Amino acid sequence: YRCGNPNPALLGSSFQIALETKDLQYMNERDYAKEEKDNVVFYHQGEALSQVSCKRFDFDARVYDFYLLKNSTYGTCEDNSSGYEYYNANGENVFGKTFSSASSFSKYGYAIVSEDGKKYYLINKKGEVASAFYDGIHITKNGYYSTEKDGLEGLMDSTGKEIFPCQYLSLAIAKEDKYQNRRIAKVELENQQLALYQVATKKEIVRYSKSQDISFYEFYIKVTDGDKLQYYSYTTGKLIFEE
């Protein structure tokens, strides 16, 4: 909210300014945290509950159930080691540990973390390991996670379950759809070859070369190779017809 107010603010249920949001992050209208120099102070209904020293917000992180704080290494905190920690509304380090790398929790309830900056994995809101360990993990559309290991790529679902192992030169969601059986992953293979897979079933639909063009339509996939056209079904992966 900005109308008539130079600073962002949180509106209450009656559309009044309930809380100025400059230098703070909030979970709801009652619970929020505020940066004060090199400290973060936790508030409930405007009353300070607790504070932690030498911490700062990660403003790129979204707040769902936890605040993601990073260690401050400035001023009086210059001897502090870098790292990230998760805090609840009461100002408690919920997992009792510091991560070298961490993301905010997704709306599906998982976050990407690393303790050594080399191996990455997912945790759930209990802090439990929820996936295998990888060299890299990145969230993609619809809650999927692209994974990396030994220079190859794979894919996990929104809960950390592996869909495709890390065995492809590259992997990306090529087509999104509200119907799961129409969500398509494109993978790069050796010898200039590409392939399309149905994400839900992990079934290969078509294999083609980089010289061919792929087009996605409502009910079919078209592969163009010069003057030759082929049409494939999303659901069965079978060749419908060619011309």
Image (spheres, helix red, strand yellow):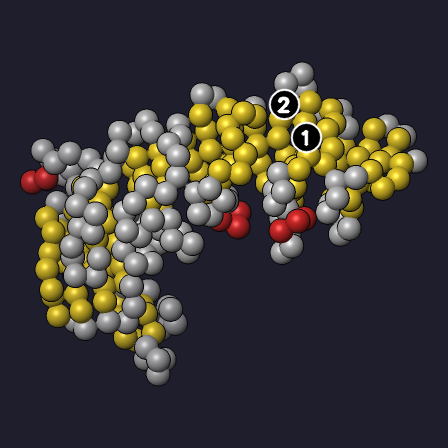
Marks 1 and 2, how far apart in space?
Answer: 7 Å
When asked about the image quadrant of residue 11, the answer is: bottom left
Q: Which mark is residue 27?
A: none
Amino acid residing under circle 1: Ala
- Image quadrant where one finds the N terminus: bottom left
Mark 2 = which residue?
Answer: 189
Q: Is residue 215 visible?
A: no
Mark 1 = which residue?
Answer: 195
Which badge, 1 or 2, is on the more N-terminal residue? 2
Residue pushed farthest left? 76
Question: x and y percent of residue 118 in the render?
Answer: 32, 27
Looking at the image, residue 5 sits to the left or right of residue 54; the answer is right
Label 2 near label 1: C-beta < 8 Å? yes
- Image quadrant where one finds the C terminus: top right
Q: Circle 1 sits in a helix, a strand or a loop, which is it?
A: strand
Give the answer, above or below, for where 48 lies relative to 176: below
Q: Circle 2 sits in a helix, a strand or a loop, which is it?
A: loop
Looking at the image, residue 85 sits to the left or right of residue 142; the answer is left
Amino acid residing under circle 2: Leu
Pick whichever, 36 or 102, lies toward us. Answer: 102
Residue pushed farthest bottom? 14
Question: x and y percent of residue 105 in the render?
Answer: 35, 51
Give the answer, above or below, for where 51 lies relative to 208: below
Residue at (44, 25) in percent of width and height? 149
Give the answer, above or below, for where 190 lies relative to 85: above
How packed is label 2: few (under 14 Cα within 10 Å), some, or many (20 or more)? some
Question: x and y percent of residue 222 in the render?
Answer: 80, 39
Residue at (16, 57) in percent of width and height? 91
Pick whichever, 41 or 217, lies toward us. Answer: 217
Looking at the image, residue 156 sits to the left or right of residue 25; the answer is right
How packed is label 1: few (under 14 Cα within 10 Å), some, or many (20 or more)? some
Residue pushed farthest top? 191
